[in-house]
Amino acid sequence: MTDYTELKRLATRIVEVQTSQDVPISKLFDDFEAAACPETILALIAENERLSADCSSMRGSLKANAASIKKLIKDGGRAARERDQLRAEVAGLRTGYEAYERVNADLKAENERLRTGVKGDYDLDAWLDWTQEAEALRKLAPSKEIIWCACGDGHAANSYGAGFMDANNGVCANCGAALGQGEQS
């Protein structure tokens, strides 16, 4: 950029003199014409056009930057919402995993307690013995096909013994003999 300080000073002085009309203006115009030669005027015009083009280019860049900034703000908002959603999901997963770990630890402890056969609570051998005894007892239990006497004798439902019991108030022939009601020798 060329230095136009002298030209500016002379132009300002001419404007001041024109408004006051106290000083002769002809000498000032001669000095101004000498400073404002065609080369200086063309340089001013060229610089003005270059600055105008630069200004226009900067306006375009500012508009493009503004559009980019708006897009970044919009994308940033979307990314922030997505980030918050992911944080919530991770927190939920973490809570679920912690609950899973607690339940898993409880189950492992109970499993270990069962494996060591805590006597009194879970005695596996005693339970197995009981199930075998229960099966034997089930075979001895009264059934609809057998009529049972108080002495423990059982008689088939359609047998002589069952009929005898029915006729003698639920007492079988063996009970009657045991009570002295049978034959005496």
Image (spheres, grey):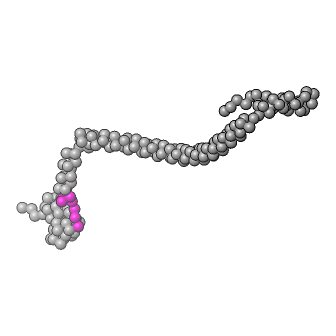
In this image, 166 relative to 83: left or right? Answer: left
Q: Residue at x 46, y 42 (%)?
A: 91
Q: If the image is split into quadrants, where does the C terminus sit? A: bottom left
- Indicate whether residue 132 is drawn in magenta: no
Percent across and percent down for residue 21 are 92, 30
Residue at left offset 23%, top offset 67%: 144
Residue at left 22%, top 45%?
124
Quarter of the image that includes the N terminus: top right
Q: Magenta residues, as a range?
A: 137-144
Q: Is residue 140 magenta?
A: yes
Q: Which of the 4 image quarters holds residue 99?
A: top left
Q: Is residue 181 left or right of residue 47?
A: left
Q: Quadrant of residue 16?
A: top right
Give the x, y percent position of residue 177: 13, 61
The number of discs equals 0
**Viewer-side residue, 53 vs 40:** 40
Along the viewing direction, whichever of 179 and 16 lies nearer the viewer: 16
**Rendered residue at 20%/63% (across/down):** 148
